[in-house]
Amino acid sequence: MAKTKIAVLISGRGSNLQALIDACKNEEYPAEIALVLSNKADAAGLERAADAGLETLVVDHKAYEDREAFEAGLDKALKNAGIQIVCLAGFMRILTPWFVDRWRDRVINIHPSLLPAFKGVHTHERALEAGVRIHGCTVHYVRSEMDAGPIIGQAAVPVLKDDDASTLGARVLEAEHRLYPACLRLVVEGKARVASEHVPMRGSVEAGQRLFNPSPFRSTQNDVKPDNAA
Ligand code: GRF
């Protein structure tokens, strides 16, 4: 069966792009990356794309008169490449209602927090400051309000005792790299359709799966046992 053509939009490092590149290498994966587009010419992710032999394009927002003109440029590039689904992966431009409506339910994003908590930047610093015990990441459909839109999937990680933003961020990032390809697959397979601004759940984890932090199990120095263990 023909694969769905996706574009990955980046502004920087591109580690989520890499996760999508790796997923797309699998013959059974239903999507192929037809375009990697960056608004910055020096985005490291462009090199990853080139290494993988992918089509790349720089659409520099600074070269356009205003946001609308930039987005018209984006729209044209995506149409020219026959793109069906757009994945934002560290793309640091806010999209206007014009673009979002034109591509409604065909643009998804990954955000490094359990939305709706910690929208915006510096999510790991803010999670630590708030003292949350569980943090994570979210893949969602894009709307014109920043970091909002129907949630497709989330992954949770514990916050650990000696975490700083960088150790916590690395733990979340590892989860991102697994979550994004999984959610994109759902979208491409038509298993994550939006209804009344929600994505109805079709499958989920077992009800018994829980992430406790701290663990409810009493712990001795080298041993972790349930409370009722002998
Ligand atoms: C990721 O943390 C992603 O959640 C956020 O921006 C970061 C991009 O990292 N939207 P990378 O460029 O994919 O490595």
Image: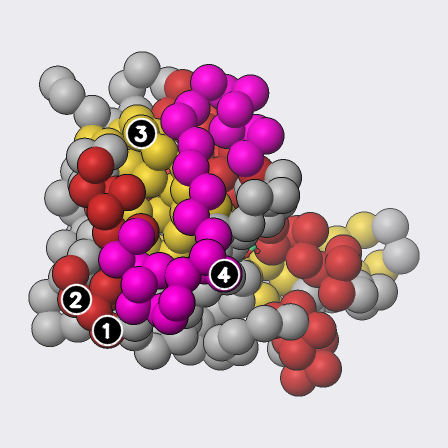
The earlier-in-sequence mark between 2 and 3 is 3
Q: Residue 80's quadrant in the figure?
A: top left
Q: Which residue lies under the disc numbered 2?
A: 101
Vertical side of 150 occupied by 203: above or below: above
The answer as to whether callout 4 falls within 8 Å of ligand 1 is: no
- Whole-percent x and y of residue 98? 21, 69
* Residue segment shown in magenta: 46-73
- Spot occupied by residue 74 in the image (x, y as percentages of width and height): 31, 51
Q: Nearer the viewer, residue 51 or 59?
A: 59
Q: Nearer the viewer, residue 9 or 74?
A: 74
Pointers 4 and 1 in contact (CB under 8 A)? Answer: no
**In x, y percent, where is residue 172?**
60, 55
Amino acid residing under circle 2: Asp
The structure residue drawn at horizontal position 59% and vertical position 48%, both measured from the top left corner, is 12
Labels 1 and 2 touching (C-beta < 8 A): yes
Calculate the distance from the C-alpha at mark 4 to the C-alpha at mark 1.
20 Å
* Residue placed under numbered mark 4 in the picture: 62
Q: Nearer the viewer, residue 67 or 27?
A: 67
**Separation (CA) of disc 2 from disc 3:** 22 Å
How was the colour assigned to the protein in this rendering? Answer: secondary structure
Q: Is residue 208 left or right of residue 201?
A: right
Residue bearing the label numbered 1: 97
